[in-house]
Image (cartoon, rainbow, N blue to C red):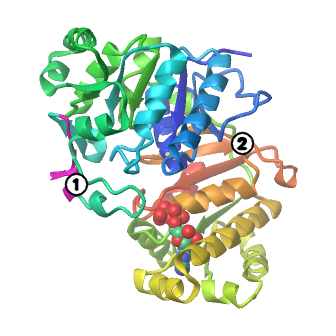
Amino acid sequence: MTKILLGCIADDFTGATDLANTLVRAGMRVVQAIGVPDDALDVGLDADAVVVALKSRTIAPADAVTQSLAALAWLQRRGAQQIYFKYCSTFDSTPAGNIGPVTEALMAALGTDFTVAAPAFPDNQRTVFKGHLFVGDLLLNESGMQSHPLTPMRDANLVRVLQAQCRGKVGLIDYRSGAAGADAIGARIDQLRREGVRLAVVDTLSNDDLLHLGAALKGMPLVTAGSGLGVGLPANFGISPCADAGGLPAATGLQAAVSGSCSLATRRQVRSFIDAGRPALGIDPLRIACGIDVVAEALAWAETQLAQGPVLVYSTADPDAVKSVQGRLGVEAAGAMVECAMAAIARGLVLRGVRQLLVAGGETSGACVQSLNIRQLKIGPQIDPGVPWCHALTDVAGAPGLHLALKSGNFGSDDFFSKAFTMQR
Ligand code: ADP
């Protein structure tokens, strides 16, 4: 069994794929594990990094700590030289907060007394200045994140946010150190350590800052960050960008997409696919609620179309339609019902020979991956920022492997579906 270099623990599913995609672009060969892997999981001979995808962002802190420590133990058994705790670039955490407790538990388990918190992702307009997180030109707490249903962020000062979640002292590596380069960051870390600081939020304004920071973090047992820092670490292991890092087995089989996302970008993508004259079938949640077997209907329809090229099955709808369905069925019940149907359709499509499957929607992706019994993904080439093609092992239909792309709602250009399938040819 080969040893991995970088071991990553991500607090949600599509965030894990985002980090994995960044690492591949920086030259690492990456496998994403779904949940804490068991010891039998074989990541192959050529993985430089493994990203363990948890769903720990909004669960109780004690459970998030337990799962993260289990992931750490697995990564340590595989020889990981550095651990990367990945969270969202908008620092999503509940008021009780999981980022602090998980970070401190990982520090204790690794026997380290210092780490950094670097959520910035400049390519995606997330920057940190004087400890304050900005989304574009707006402070985090004025960006819309203050009214997020699960993780409302009402303070943009991350030193304060993190301090409220931590026992150890929180400090700041400010923009002057970042701009001055890796040595200046190293000197600032030494100074903070002498002052008894255990965690330092890092000002980051650009990708250059992330590259300086990456170099300064060489050998640090634990780093915590959004996906942005992924550009700065592979060089510490002697790895540089190369096209081979995202190499996957050749794509075979039929092509299909399922979309349970109602986000704006996905709505445009569904419209674009239909306008291009491609076959697409809409699913009506109210018909599912009436007991009609829409899964069987969709699969019967798909069987007649698949041989001619890619098909799309979607529940994607405008906000008014979604609100109306939610009003009649309840928000959670409607969501769960549609996810369950889309997951069964994804499984049925694979049973009918689909080997290149696109899934739109974060929660929808989770449901589909579960129904396909997928435990790991090898990360391949990027389709659009944050969304790579992957190769997954599944035991459904005795398929040796499946090409899968999991797109979170607001990612991707309007022609994403067509572009992704064309790229596979
Ligand atoms: P996104 O990444 O865009 O947020 P998700 O898959 O995470 O997409 O979430 C979309 C949620 O909306 C899922 O729970 C899905 O089942 C639900 N949903 C999809 N289509 C409809 C619809 N037509 N009416 C009501 N809920 C829907």
Please tell me whether residue 108 is drawn above or below residue 41 in the rendered image. Answer: above
Pair 1/2: label in front: 1
Q: Residues within 10 Å of mark 1 (few under 14, many from 20)?
A: many
The reply to whether the C-beta atoms of the residues labelled 1 and 2 are less than 8 Å apart is no
- Left or right, 228 with respect to 423, comes to left
Q: Earlier in the sequence, mark 1 or mark 2?
A: 1
Residue 141 lies in the magenta stretch: yes
Q: What's the amino acid at mark 2?
A: Arg
User: Circle 2 sits in a helix, a strand or a loop, which is it?
Assistant: loop
Asked whether residue 120 is in view, the answer is no
- Left or right, 147 with respect to 53, comes to left
Q: Is mark 1 within 8 Å of ligand 1?
A: no
Q: Report x, y in % for residue 4.
A: 61, 18
Q: Residue furthest front?
A: 167
In the picture of the structure, the residue carrying the numbered disc 1 is: 141
Q: Report x, y in % for residue 97.
A: 41, 44
Q: What's the amino acid at mark 1?
A: Asn
Q: What segment carries the magenta color?
A: 131-142
Q: Report x, y in % for residue 89.
A: 35, 43
* Residue in the picture at 66% in, 66% down: 309
Residue 404 lies in the magenta stretch: no
Q: Report x, y in % for residue 175.
A: 15, 27
Q: How many marks?
A: 2
Q: Residue furthest right?
A: 398
**Nearer the observer, 143 or 243:** 143
The numbered mark at residue 375 is 2
* Residue in the picture at 21% in, 37% down: 128
- Left or right, 251 with respect to 386, comes to right
- Left or right, 366 with respect to 197, comes to right
Please tell me whether residue 117 is drawn above or below residue 181 in the rendered image. Answer: below
